[in-house]
Image: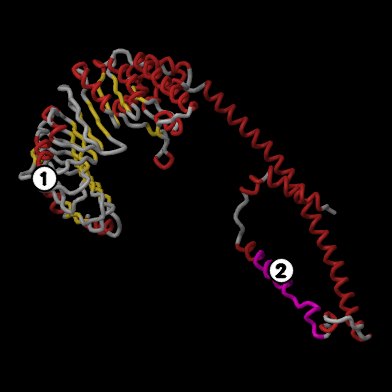
Amino acid sequence: MCRDEDLYYYEHDRRCLCSEAFEDLPDATEDELQAQKMGDALVASIEHRPSAKEDPRFALFFTSNDVPMAAQAAVVNGILEEHNASLILLEAELAEQHTKLYNAQVTMRSLISRQRVLKAEQEYLTREIDTCRGIVSPVRSLPREIIAEIFLYFAPVLTTGHSFITKPKDDAVRVPRVAIPWQLGQVCREWRTVAVSLHSLWSACDFPSPHSHETRQQTWGASSNPDDILKQTACIERSLASVETRLYRSGPNPISAQVVDHNPAHTMPFVNTLSRHSRRLKSLFLVDPTEETIDLFYESITQYSQLRSLGLASVSSTPSISFVYPSSLTNLSFHSLHLSTANCSCIPWTQLTKYCEIKCSWGGEEANRWSSYANLQNAVDLCVHFIRSVRAPQQPVLLPALRHARLTYPGRQSILPYFDTPMLEGLSYNHPYGAGFELKLPRQLSSLRSLRVCAENCPRFTCNLRHTMMMAPNLSEFFVIVKPPRAFDFVAAL
């Protein structure tokens, strides 16, 4: 017969060591659930059986010390004999059940112990298989030139400033672009040699270097704590050392830089280091630049003769930034800024081939907005995210060289009639808010090949397919995002 302490030991051991074995058990079947419900019902019925205290024949004896009569005592003794006999049978059956349970528990502990051994053996064999496969892997026979060619596929990521996604979207892990060459070099000695020898892999020089969220907050936040100050100093030194390494390994190649200017005292050493390589700087993106940083670039702007791409952004506010734009600029982007005639008068609009404006405000200078857009005569790529409805220009803005446009506009009326784009090949239009919207091409676009419309938050989306096909006879890709039931209506129309 099993003892209570044996049962307790098993329960404790099962919770601590063998819980994973019970996690793999299948869900209970319908028959098992029905049997469990019947057992619960029997337990409830037993608990609600009438007691001797409720028997009217014996009620007097629970409120007094009277001696029962002989007939009454005989009835009570009969009940006692019946209950004692039933209790003996129940204890025997309960002991038998305890014995079976104990044996099952011993068997389960043995099975779980065996399972752990098998899992350890499985992990060992898996590691050995991976190790042996690594020895005979075809990648060992790849020449360094082929490995280098594969590494160069990261070049677009390094020059555009986007993160690299290592997993599918549902479980994405974004790797900062400056971390890509370091991670490639950690695979093996051969890959590190190839990575170090490729100058273009080290062309991204961002400051601060990527760290954990907590470290970045400690680094750029104002703090008087001595420990935080030491961490800030150490983090800044690591970032500067990483920048120096990347500048050295990039060789004579053009470089791309991003500066998050949270603290001028921390950022100035990096800007000074970058200024020594100003003639190699091809792309620059400034986030929250301070006046000190802008003044430093202003003093040496003539040295940035190779600067082609410039981006200005604000995260904490929507300021008005005055910047001196080099004459070599061809790609310009603004993010969350206040634009006006004062800070845009020196932009070389006619030289720009790409222009991006995300969530920027022009205040009451809508006329200046349209006149600035009209100067984009050589732009082939335009991206504008309007934050509110705007007044229409006096006449459509002619953009004769525009090939690709990405527009986000919250107004009820389409903003497409505000532009005249005879050479447009690709159009992406996003209607972000929950107002009615009608897609209607204002003129015939014989060059339009791709049309993408996102109106998933729009309760009333209207599109005349016949009119759209007539205006874009060479359309080969039509991509629309709408909510049901409009989606079904749209598919039926197709």
Determine the residue positioned at 42% across, 42% down. 170
| Residue stretch rendered in magenta on the structure | 35-56
Amino acid at dot 2: Val
Circle 1 residue: 418
Res. 457 visible in picture: yes
Q: Looking at the rendering, which quadrant does residue 387 occupy? A: top left
Q: Looking at the rendering, which quadrant does residue 83 occupy? A: bottom right
443 relative position to 118: left or right:
left
Circle 2 residue: 43
Few, some or many C-alpha atoms within 10 Å of disc 1 (few <14, some 14-19, many ≥20)? Answer: some
Q: Quadrant of the C terminus?
A: bottom left
Judging depth in this view, the residue of 55 and 263 nearest the camera is 263
Q: Measured from the top left, where is residue 105 in percent x and y?
A: 75, 49
Determine the residue positioned at 18% across, 39% down. 405
- Asked whether 117 falls inside the magenta stretch, the response is no
Amino acid at dot 1: Tyr
438 relative position to 146: left or right:
left
Q: Looking at the rendering, which quadrant does residue 203 occupy? A: top left
Q: Measured from the top left, where is residue 426 in percent x and y?
A: 19, 39
Q: Measured from the top left, where is residue 100 in percent x and y?
A: 79, 55
Res. 153 visible in picture: no
Q: Which sits earlier in the primary sequence, circle 1 or circle 2?
A: 2
- Asked whether 46 falls inside the magenta stretch, the response is yes
What is the C-alpha distance between the residues marked 1 and 2? 78 Å
Question: Is most of the magenta stretch helix, strand or loop?
Answer: helix
Query: Which secondary structure lies at badge 1?
Result: helix
Q: Report how many numbered discs are placed on residues in the image.
A: 2
| Furthest residue in direction right, as rendered | 70
